[in-house]
Amino acid sequence: MRNHRARVSHLKLLGHRHRKASTTQQTPIVPKLRVCVCPIQDRETKLAMFILHKMSLFSLSRTLSKPTPQLPLKSFCSLGGGGFNGKRRPTGRRVSCFSTANAVATESSQTATVEDTQKPEPVLTEERIVLPTNQSSDRLLKIRHTCAHVMAMAVQKLYPDAKVTIGPWIENGFYYDFDMEPLTDKELKRIKKEMDRIIGRNLPLVREEVSRDEAQRRIMSVNEPYKMEILDSIKEEPITIYHIAACRFISLFLGDEWWDLCAGPHVETTGIIDRKAVELESVAGAYWRGDEKNQMLQRIYGTAWESEEQLKAYLHFKEEAKRRDHRRLGQDLDLFSIQDEAGGGLVFWHPKGAIVRHIIEDAWKKMHIANGYELLYTPHVAKADLWKISGHLDFYRENMFEQMKIEDEQYQLRPMNCPYHILIYKRKQNSYRDFPIRVAELGTVYRYELSGSLHGLFRVRGFTQDDAHIFCLEDQIKDEIRGVLDLTEEILLLFGFSRYEVNLSTRPEKAVGGDEIWDKATNALRNALDDKGWDYEIDEGGGAFYGPKIDLKIEDALGRKWQCSTIQVDFNLPQRFDITYVDATSEKKRPILIHRAVLGSLERFFGVLIEHYAGDFPLWLTPIQVRVLPVTDNQLEFCNEVTRKLKDSGVRAEVCHGERLPKLIRNAEKQKVPLMAVVGPKEVETQTVTVRSRSSGDVGTIDIDDFISRIKSTVEERTTL
């Protein structure tokens, strides 16, 4: 036999066919197999080729003088009861081989191979690194999903008692939840090292479909209770399983493999992943199903990219995002807190944060009044019957707090403001001449969120929505929507947001209202967007069951997008509450209802503002505009006089003393106070202040009245002093 130095890159095991099922019984789902063998080490090549020659049951697809990349798998692999924990199979357990005639293929080998070799680098746009996303790169999504599986395989290899739960891809990477003892950062390094080993082995990922009974049998055989619970929640059949298979060609066994319930997609082999583009970031506690009543799990977060360069760009972005984290800045700048004694998701606005909130609310109210809105204030609770009429008890109950009994009647905290505004509309009979009717409220609502989903100001249980409702005629929809778009742009520009992502969501399969009114409303939204000149995407079928909607995401300083404004036409609530108006012929008709929120919620918007500005708010929005600093306490009396004069002029100012001047300046800069007015003996004598700007350094010594005038001018013009 010749000394073959080639490696086997792709082999098919062509086995006997299974017996035909009886026509009187339902044909079971039979796993079908085509095995793709991993590259064989050089020391095994002679023996491998000898066995191939002798068996004559195999066909060698091609032989190359150099190692070749693993070809994509196109089939399923029946692994007869393998385990999650990656333990080697008992010796002598042979893989069954069946016909692959009915196997469902994945991507074509030619296309997949070409795509997987392309690694687009980060794009520099307007001094910002633009990284690929799961939406823009199908390859990146597959890499991240596969990394979650590789990590789980590594964890169970190192910690055999660990139980697996779920492991999806997420925005910048992946995670997996394990029921195991708490992990340390040192152990994360150990897991990453094992992941690198698995990736380096270039193991194929094999997709298999099995019956529900077979899936149950396999899960029970490896004692994975969480997977059994997941299986129970899957309604469709057959059940899809993905294997990371270490193929042993010589013995015709598949051992040392790991598998998981999964619908995919994945890369073809682990070798496609760049080990230097993967990093395990952190470990945190997470409740199973996000419910604090369930078992606490260990969640390992990781990030994965297409290249090492992308990973470096992401890590730089991550550091900047960490510096801007509103939870840390909220504490450092004394803006807000969430108190354990009160409960999770309930926000306490501190004096400085409350000042910013007051400025936001004041600007919001003035702009709404100028645009023809009437302001409302409504209760925080209502009888449960109100929520039954609105449909919330039927469709939204799981997000509502429990009812409370008051004088033999059930009451409930409000999850939304809409029913209250409708009740105010119903207080009298309206005429077509009254339309449009625009009402608005900064209304606090309460929604039950699982503790595991709470996140700073971004996900809370009590929050204030900038809710508004417009009651109008059908032929007024377009003009009203256009007016809302103009007001939305005006408000967002005021707070420094000029980039948006806009989506128009159309009618879903199940919806209330006829085709004619849906078409008219959808066209009105579309025409309003076209008139505005905004680019937008159509989300076909993404509307609510009660009407089409426009969603707007704002882009912050780091290029992150945040769900903010929503404009929604509603055909449902007018019908449920039986609201009407009298038309020109004295006939009662049903008005159109438009829901809209510009900021979304004050809490969430404030969190976005903090991160957008990194806590360094513009002068007009910052809680403290000027901090007056004495060189020594001998100037304290004059400092108090200056502060009073500033406050009387509407400038937000405070005195800080008791430390040496350099430390007072450092503290003011740490607190992100934009202006410091330094007062020494010379300033007392000349009745002036020496102004220092946090952004531009020393401004100079100026008269107090001139200082106040310049501050007012800067605030009015929204510029920098």
Image (tube, grey):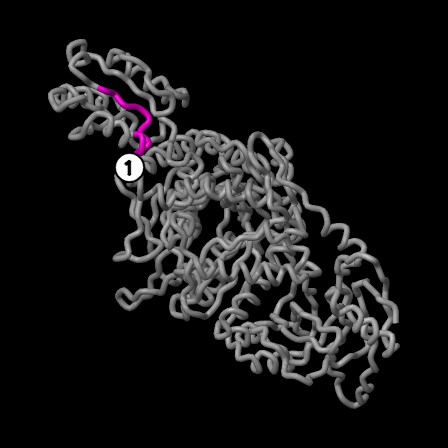
In this rendering, position of residue 477 left or right of residue 469: right
Q: Position of residue 102 (x, y in %)?
A: 81, 73
Up-down relation of residue 639 to residue 82 (above or below): above
Q: Position of residue 462 (x, y in %)?
A: 36, 52
Q: Is residue 618 magenta?
A: no
> SS of the residue at dot 1?
helix
Name the residue carrying label 1: 352
Q: Quadrant of the C terminus?
A: top left
Q: Quadrant of the N terminus?
A: bottom right
Q: Magenta span covers which residues?
A: 669-678
Up-down relation of residue 496 to residue 110 (above or below): above
Quadrant of residue 313 within the rendered picture: top right
Q: Residue at x 51, y 55 (%)?
A: 280
Up-down relation of residue 661 to residue 80 (above or below): above
Q: Residue at x 40, y 55 (%)?
A: 454
Q: Residues within 10 Å of mark 1 (few under 14, many from 20)?
A: some
Q: Amino acid at mark 1?
A: Lys
Q: Is residue 675 magenta?
A: yes
Observer able to see residue 58: yes
Quadrant of residue 143 within the rendered picture: bottom right
Q: Nearer the viewer, residue 405 or 30?
A: 30
Q: Residue at x 42, y 31 (%)?
A: 367
Quadrant of residue 322 within the rendered picture: top left
Q: Nearer the viewer, residue 273 or 429?
A: 273
Up-down relation of residue 196 to residue 667 (above or below): below
